[in-house]
Image (tube, rainbow, N blue to C red):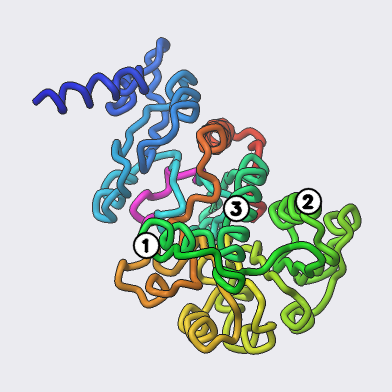
Amino acid sequence: MRTLGRLRRLKTTLVPEFHSWCKLQAPNAAGKQLPRIYVTRRIPPDGMKILSQSGLCNIEQWDSDEPVPRSELLEKVAGIRGLYCLLTEKIDAEVLDAAGPSLQVVSTMSVGYDHVSLEELKKRGIRLGYTPDVLTEAVAELTVALLLATSRRLLEAVDEAKNGGWGTWKPLWMCGYGLTDSTVGILGLGRIGAAVMARLKPFGVKRFLYADTGPRPDMATKIPAEFVPLEELARHSDFIVVCCALTPETQGICGNRLFSLMKDTAIFINTSRGGVVNQEDLYQALVNGQIAAAGLDVTEPEPLPTDHPLLKLKNCVILPHIASATVATRNAMAALAASNLLAGLQGKAMGKEVPL
Ligand code: DGY
């Protein structure tokens, strides 16, 4: 009872307008029925504040930290004008059909939009907002943290310290790979890839390579980074960092062929989407010593089942998709997604819109 009371108080302190958000709002002062929107999760306060204070929509929300069940989503979207979703909801023909012709705008609180069927949106003339830029720094920072944790074997070392494996100081024990004089290869040189390179440069990296659908001089010249074919990137890199979007072209692009070309001392890092990697091939590469280690912030599926073979490997560091998880970044993402949605409802230009 006391815990329940404490939880309620906490909810009211953190989220003062919590109660009003969860129910439909009344018509506005002019008595006009406001457009209905559906928010598929409990979201950071800055986003909710923008929606609730706008006076532009009636909000209904799945008020939980857990994803909305598919059946509930299909029921709740009927007749809505705007949908505020996360990367965990598959927005496909079924959802759009359930929403019906009233739906004008989908706004995802994510930079990635591989969970949204662009083709189905386009067919129906529905606009899509997303949240690039505001998470670039946080994701780049976490990518560097994951790279260092993986290459310097931090998690293994912490385990050893806790579990009695720490004997005397040994010259050959717990040795990993450093960034000084290394070659770093970025797969997918966008904003995040460039921000990762900028952060790695002061570590003494000798050479930056990148592979992409074509040269990106706008991103590459400042570092500088050389555009190379993927095979060359694989052969020469000491660290490969995957920063590309998941598309039909990049699905499974990191598989046996790539791993077999990589150095056996190389480190593989992925903070983009799990679908870019063939996880069975990665497992084999790690077990057979084709590559030294991998650090993943994203997997397929998510969450990765706790009995997944990759989780058993000492040379694989797996994080639960937390690259953008700073309080400020999540608030900025929530706020941008909210403004995008409101702009879309009013037929105005969105801050960040996916061209369809
Ligand atoms: C996104 O926004 O697509 C990221 O994966 C969230 O961290």
Instruction: Identify the image quadrant of the C terminus.
Output: bottom right
Q: Quadrant of residue 187?
A: bottom right
Residue sticking out furthest to the left:
1
Q: Which residue is mark 1?
A: 164
Instruction: Answer with mark 3 or mark 1, whichever residue precedes in sequence.
Output: 3
Q: Which residue is mark 3?
A: 145
Residue 316: say if magenta. Answer: no
Q: Residue at x 40, y 67 (%)?
A: 301
Q: Which residue is mark 2?
A: 198
Q: Amino acid at mark 1?
A: Gly
Instruction: Answer with mark 3 or mark 2, whichever residue precedes in sequence.
Output: 3
The magenta region covers 94-107
Question: Whole-Å distance between the Cαs marked 1 and 2?
Answer: 38 Å
Residue 104: say if magenta. Answer: yes
Q: Nearer the viewer, mark 3 or mark 2?
A: 3
Q: Position of residue 110 (x, y in %)?
A: 54, 48
Q: How many marks?
A: 3
